[in-house]
Amino acid sequence: MKIGLLNKIFLKIQFLNLHKQFSMKIFVLVLFVFSFAVNSNAQLFKYADYNPIELGKVHWLRNYDAALLKAEKVDKPVFILFQEVPGCSNCTKYGKNILSHPLIVEAIEDEFIPLAIYNNKKGHDGEVLKYFNEPAWNNPVVRFVSSNGSEVGPRIGNFSSTSQLLLAMQTVIKNSKKEVPNYLTLLTDEYLAKENGTDDFYLSMYCFWTGEKEIAKIKGVIATEAGYMHGKEVVKVSFDESQTDISKIAHKASKKNCGDQVFTNVNVNGKIPSKKIGKYRKDGQDKYYLLHSPLKYLPMTEYQKSKVNSALGSNDDSKKYLSPRQLLLLKKSINTKNLIEEDFVNTWYKTVGVSAP
């Protein structure tokens, strides 16, 4: 009888041990699946986190001849960065800001063969520097060559202008008989607006959601926002001053019944009915069409948000404004937070699980 009791106790212990082992296996499996899900976005894009800060997030080749061979093989031009590493504040800012912007990194890696040449080193770097007659210990310079080494675009020595670099990239892509991606065109226009100067004003209308949809289509408008002013529904309009002005935008908007009155502190010389800017309150459903779309979980620039929102409201192809990596992230993303209000660069790297620059 005692032996029977001992056997029962022993069997009970074995069952508990097996149960614990099984539970532990289930726990480990669940943990693995959860870990994979959390990190799945990080597996989509490999960024060069090992780079010196001056080189940003781009994967660079470091040999000129190897770059030419690869360019010939894949039929792409070479993007040559002449950079001081370690460098001055201009060099580090260039790497941290321009060469770490996710869409610029994507364009450089997808449309070109990236090659980094240090302008403060001897050996191979020094030989290439001398071949292109570039000064040593200099601020960042970008040049573009074909697979045979011939120049295919302008030399970019203005390290403080992002738009000049983006315009040059577009020129080289066109010279290579290829189509410039929509996202790169949008990004260029957005940076041109920032560097040329932007201004804001407010347009009242019967429905600001319709207003956002229609006004975002107007050339020179780079951002829209729905809100209230003087007791009316209004759209806050940000525009590129070099491309258009308040009168032109208001006139085009009125044709779509989206421009009853202008609120601005700028003198419009009586060309259009206007009133001074008053207290403004943003609407809780700004970017209405985007807010009610799965695209709201995707990191986008401000210009992209306005264009995508407009396309969604017009039953147009909203995804044509997105980059291939954005489209891939859209398929894989497990983010459940509305990103309409978020900063693009930091949110992008956080979403894909990579340290921000």
Image (spheres, rainbow, N blue to C red):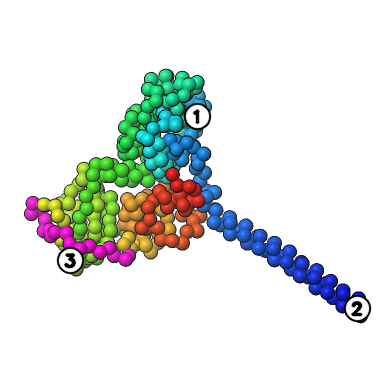
Left/right of residue 79 with respect to residue 212 in the rendered view: right
Q: Position of residue 91 (x, y in %)?
A: 39, 34
Residue type at numbered disc 1: Arg
What is the distance, in whole Å, between disc 3 and disc 1 at their CAs?
Answer: 59 Å
Write down the region rendered in magenta: 268-285
- Binning the other alpha carbons within 10 Å of mark 3 as few (below 14), some (14 to 19) or many (20 upward) gives some
Q: Position of residue 332 (x, y in %)?
A: 51, 55
Pointer 2: what residue?
2
Mark 3 lies on residue = 230
As drawn, which residue projects farthest toward the left? 270
For label 1, the residue is: 62
Inter-mark Cα distance, 1 to 2? 78 Å
Tell me the number on the disc at residue 176: none
Dot 3 falls on a residue whose secondary structure is loop
Q: Residue at x 36, y 58 (%)?
A: 341
Q: Is residue 96 magenta?
A: no
Of 185 and 81, nearer the camera is: 81
SS at mark 2? Answer: helix
Marks 3 and 2, Cα distance to the nearest angstrom?
Answer: 91 Å
Q: Main secondary structure of the magenta part?
A: loop
